[in-house]
Image: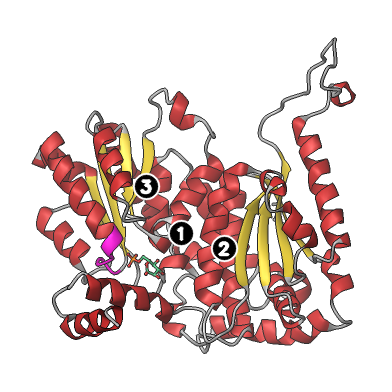
C-alpha cells in the first residue's frame, strides 16, 4: 500500500529553529480533540470516521441509483453550491479525460453543474442546451433552502417534467438533502424522488464522501469504492494515535501554522495538472470557510501551473513576501507522450527529442520550486503517486483532517461559517423577501443616504 507523502524540508530555512516542533504537541492535542469530541464545533465532526463507516451495501445503493440515471440520461445536471458542489466537480475533473465532453461517445453521461451562480445568461444557455437532451437532475442542498440551488432546481424540474413527462422525471430526479428539514426534502418526499440524506453532523465542505459527492462521481462513471478505500486508508494513518513523525495531517497543520505565525498570511495551492483546477477550488472552500473568522485565518489562494507562471508567476517570485506555497505533485502521468523529432528543428526543441512531456513538466516544477525558494517563498510538497480514485480519496481525507487540526491551532471553530449569512441577509432584504420587512426598510434607508 502506497501513501501520499508530505515534504516540508523547504520550509525549514524560513522558520526559526523548533517552530514546527513547538506546535507538535498542540497539533496532536487538536487531533485528539477531534477524536474525543471536545473541540469547538464538535456537533460537526461526523466526517472524521465517515470513510471507515461506509459499507459495501451503501456503495452498492449509490451505484444502483447512478445506474438508473446513467441508463436514462445522456446529461446529468448536478445542482448545488459550495460544499454541495465543489467536491463532486473536483473529483470528476481530476479523474476524467480533459476532452470527454467533446469526444463523448455515449459511454458516460455528460455532467453539468448548475445552482452555483445566479447568472441569467448561464441558466438561459443551459436550459436552451438541455432542450435537445435526455437529462436528469441531482438536487443537492444540505439546508434545502439555498437560493442559488433552489432557483436552478425550480427551472430544471419544470423543464425535465415538460420534456420527459412526470413519470420519467420522477425517475431521473434525485435529491440529496437533510433527513427532515428544508424545501428540497419537502419536494422530494411529495414527488417521490429517490433521495439520500446528508448526515446532520457533516458540514457541507466536509461532505464529498457522502452521497453529495459519491452519487455525481458514480454517475460520471468513476469507481467510488476505490475513492472511499483511499480515504479509509488515509483515515488510519492520520488517526489520533499515530505519532507526529508519521502523521502527515498533523504535520501539515503544524507547518502551515508555524508559517502563519511567522507572517506568511497566504497559502497558495499549486498544481501542475490542469485536471486539479477544481480540486484547488474545493480546497479553498474547505480551508477558507473553516479558518477565516474572528479576524484570523490563512488566506487560501490557488494557481494552476505552469499556466499561471505566465500570469501570477511574477507576483509569487517577487511580490510581497507574505506567502507560502503548497504544491500537489503527481509523480506519474497516466499517458505516455514523447517529443517527436523534427528535421528542420525550427523551434530549437530537438534537444527534447524522445523525452516524455511529463519529464519536462517535472523539470518545470523543480525549477519553479527552487526559484520560488530563492525568492523567499517557503514550499510544502504533497506527493501523489498518481492521479487515480484511490489517491484522490487519500488526498481528500488528508486535507479534511489537516483542516480540522489546523483550524484549532488558529483557535477558531473550524466547523461553522457565520460570516456567510451577511450577504444573504442583504440580498433577501433587497429582494423584499417576506419576513425581512425590517431589514428591507433599513437597507433602503442606507442606500438612499
Ligand atoms: O448545501 P447547502 O445548504 O445548499 O449549502 C451550500 C453552501 O452554502 C452556504 O452558504 C455555506 O456557506 C456553505 O458551507 C455551503 O456548503
The x and y percentages for residue 254 are 72, 77
Magenta span: helix, strand or loop, mainly? loop
Are dots 3 and 2 in contact, CB under 8 Å?
no
> How far apart, in angstroms, are the residues tagged by discs 3 and 2?
23 Å
Question: Residue 144 in magenta?
Answer: yes
The residue at the point 87 percent across, 55 percent down is 370
The x and y percentages for residue 202 are 41, 71
Q: Which residue is mark 1?
A: 209
Using the image, tell me which numbered label, if any, was put on residue 113.
3
Image vertical order of residue 334 relative to residue 216, above or below: above
- Camera-side residue of 265 and 413: 265
Image vertical order of residue 250 relative to residue 205, above or below: below
Q: Please name which of the two marks, 3 or 2, marks the residue nearer to the observer.
A: 3
The residue at the point 85 percent across, 26 percent down is 352
In this orientation, does residue 48 appear? no
The x and y percentages for residue 26 are 69, 87
Q: Please name which of the two marks, 3 or 1, marks the residue nearer to the observer.
A: 3
Q: Earlier in the sequence, mark 3 or mark 2?
A: 3
Q: Which residue is mark 2?
A: 397
Assign a secondary structure to mark 3. strand
Are dots 1 and 2 in contact, CB under 8 Å?
yes
Assign a secondary structure to mark 2. helix
Span colored in magenta? 143-148
Amino acid at each position: 500500500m502506497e501513501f501520499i507523502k508530505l515534504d516540508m524540508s523547504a520550509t525549514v530555512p524560513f522558520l526559526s529553529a523548533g517552530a514546527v516542533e513547538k506546535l507538535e504537541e498542540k497539533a496532536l492535542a487538536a487531533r485528539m480533540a477531534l477524536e474525543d469530541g471536545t473541540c469547538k464545533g464538535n456537533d460537526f465532526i461526523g466526517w472524521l470516521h465517515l470513510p471507515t463507516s461506509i459499507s459495501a451495501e451503501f456503495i452498492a445503493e449509490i451505484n444502483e441509483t447512478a445506474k438508473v440515471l446513467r441508463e436514462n440520461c445522456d446529461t446529468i445536471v448536478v445542482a448545488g453550491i459550495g460544499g454541495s458542489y465543489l467536491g463532486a466537480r473536483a473529483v470528476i475533473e481530476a479523474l476524467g479525460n480533459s476532452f470527454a465532453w467533446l469526444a463523448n461517445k455515449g459511454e458516460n453521461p455528460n455532467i453539468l453543474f448548475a445552482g452555483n451562480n445566479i447568472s441569467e445568461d448561464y441558466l438561459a444557455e443551459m436550459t436552451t442546451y438541455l432542450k435537445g437532451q435526455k437529462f436528469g437532475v441531482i438536487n443537492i442542498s444540505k439546508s434545502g433552502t439555498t437560493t442559488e440551488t433552489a432557483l436552478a432546481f425550480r427551472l430544471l424540474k419544470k423543464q425535465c417534467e415538460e420534456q420527459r413527462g412526470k413519470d420519467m422525471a420522477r425517475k431521473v430526479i434525485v435529491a440529496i438533502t437533510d433527513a427532515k428539514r428544508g424545501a428540497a426534502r419537502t419536494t422530494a418526499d411529495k414527488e417521490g424522488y429517490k433521495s439520500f440524506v446528508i448526515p446532520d453532523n457533516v458540514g457541507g465542505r466536509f461532505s464529498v464522501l457522502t452521497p453529495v459527492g459519491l452519487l455525481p462521481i458514480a454517475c460520471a462513471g468513476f469507481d467510488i469504492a476505490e475513492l472511499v478505500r483511499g480515504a479509509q486508508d488515509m483515515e488510519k494513518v492520520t488517526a489520533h494515535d499515530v505519532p507526529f513523525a508519521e502523521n502527515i495531517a498533523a504535520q501539515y497543520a503544524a507547518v502551515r501554522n508555524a508559517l502563519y505565525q511567522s507572517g506568511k498570511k497566504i497559502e497558495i495551492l499549486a498544481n501542475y495538472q490542469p485536471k486539479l483546477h477544481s480540486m484547488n477550488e474545493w480546497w479553498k472552500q474547505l480551508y477558507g470557510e473553516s479558518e477565516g473568522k474572528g479576524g484570523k485565518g490563512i488566506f487560501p489562494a490557488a494557481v494552476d501551473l505552469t499556466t499561471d507562471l505566465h500570469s501570477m508567476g511574477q507576483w509569487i517570485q517577487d511580490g510581497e513576501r507574505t506567502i507560502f506555497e503548497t504544491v500537489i505533485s503527481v509523480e506519474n502521468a497516466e499517458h505516455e507522450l514523447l517529443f517527436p523529432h523534427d528535421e528542420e528543428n525550427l523551434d530549437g526543441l530537438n534537444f527534447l527529442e524522445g523525452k516524455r512531456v511529463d519529464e519536462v513538466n517535472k523539470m518545470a516544477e523543480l525549477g519553479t520550486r527552487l526559484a520560488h525558494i530563492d525568492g523567499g517563498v517557503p514550499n510544502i510538497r504533497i506527493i501523489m503517486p498518481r492521479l487515480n480514485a484511490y489517491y484522490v480519496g487519500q488526498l481528500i481525507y488528508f486535507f479534511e483532517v489537516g483542516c480540522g487540526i489546523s483550524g484549532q491551532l488558529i483557535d477558531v471553530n473550524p466547523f461553522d461559517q457565520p460570516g456567510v449569512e451577511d450577504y444573504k441577509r442583504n440580498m433577501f432584504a433587497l429582494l423584499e423577501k417576506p419576513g425581512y420587512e425590517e431589514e428591507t426598510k433599513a437597507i433602503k434607508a442606507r442606500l438612499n443616504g
